[in-house]
Image: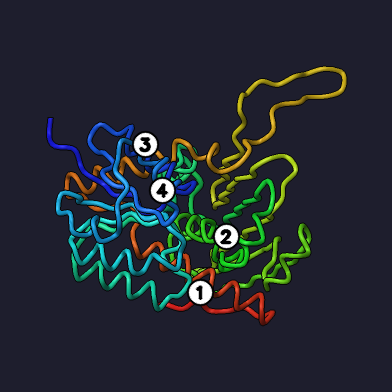
Amino acid sequence: MSERLEIAVFGAGRMGRVHGQNVTRHPAARVRYVVDVDTKSAQALAAATGAEVASVETVLADKAVRAAIITTPTPSHLDLIVGCAHMGKAIFCEKPIDLSIARVNECLAAVERARVPFAVGFQRRFDPTFRALKHAVDAGAIGTVEVVRITSRDPKPPPHSYVASSGGLFRDMMIHDFDMANWFLGEPTTMVFATGSCLVDPEIAKFGDVDTGIAVLRTASGKLCHIDNSRHAAYGYDQRIEVFGSKGLLQAGNQTATTMQLWNERGVTSDKALPFFPERYVEAYAAEIAHFIDAVSHGTPVEVGGEAGRASLALADAAQKSRDSGQPVTPSNG
């Protein structure tokens, strides 16, 4: 058996734990170091993965560490990406790469200079249901794509402390949907119109943000995409996609804990949608990390890289500008 890929995990919060545990389950990789300013969290993840707690400097200097997973707060991504790239380490970074296109470009330039693999954490592309939908679209099952509809609704709003530094609903939450829109539309968006309201938690408005948002996208050929987000859905984590084409329609619905249904005189009932993204995307998170490990180990291209991260942020920026101005906006090309 070949030597396992040694990986450092920056950030021992929720996503650090998810990715760290998936690395541990992979037979070709292991977590060598965990880095976090919160010592207790770092120690807990290190204990769970058989790793050591270390500093950024230790990780960057250790040539045995060939890859890094970055799940720290967004403002720290740039320095970590540039540092890892400079030391020749492959990088997996959670979205968004940064809240600034200029800083994203700086990250991508560093990665390009170093010629290291760089993957961005848009796990929905690795979800088995959404991948099946994409394969059917690409196979021509519905002819030419005309309209894409994407619904994403969280079960409850995040803490205000998170909202304050998140970059807003369009850059924090809808950015996943912008990536899916790019994936299914198959061509660049030339116009974005977006609007939003605070219908769930009025306090969110104090941060200049919204908790309910809609964006409409149009491509050069006229394809359309409608995205709606809400920070609260009483029935669970709502994740649905519909692709309408010249020859038919494809849909991907919500997942539930079981497929059991009760039929009686009052009607038909079933389980609610799964609670939130850790439960909904268990398979997707495992698959994206497995893909990253395989790409680094075998020298093959990553499927979702820096350009996907930049393109989705460009749409998020355009949506925010549209919401602020009340006018359609042309996304930046970089």
Q: State the colouring used for the structure image.
A: rainbow
Q: Amino acid at mark 3?
A: Ala
Q: Helix, strand, or loop for circle 2?
A: helix
Q: Which residue is mark 1?
A: 190
Relative to 15, is 113 above or below? below
Taking the spot 33% from the left edge, 48% from the top edge, the residue there is: 34
Q: Are marks 1 and 4 in contact (CB under 8 Å)?
A: no
**Splitting the image into 4 quarters, where does residue 116 fall?**
bottom left
Q: Helix, strand, or loop for circle 4?
A: helix
Which mark is first along the chain, 4 or 1? Answer: 4
Q: Which residue is mark 4?
A: 138
Which mark is first along the chain, 3 or 1? Answer: 3
Q: Is residue 135 visible?
A: no
Taking the spot 31% from the left edge, 64% from the top edge, the residue there is: 81
Taking the spot 78% from the left edge, 64% from the top edge, the residue there is: 202
Q: Residue 257, percent across and down?
A: 61, 28
Which mark is first along the chain, 2 or 1? Answer: 2
Q: Amino acid at mark 1?
A: Thr
Q: CA distance from mark 2 to mark 4?
A: 24 Å
- 62 or 129: nearer the viewer: 62
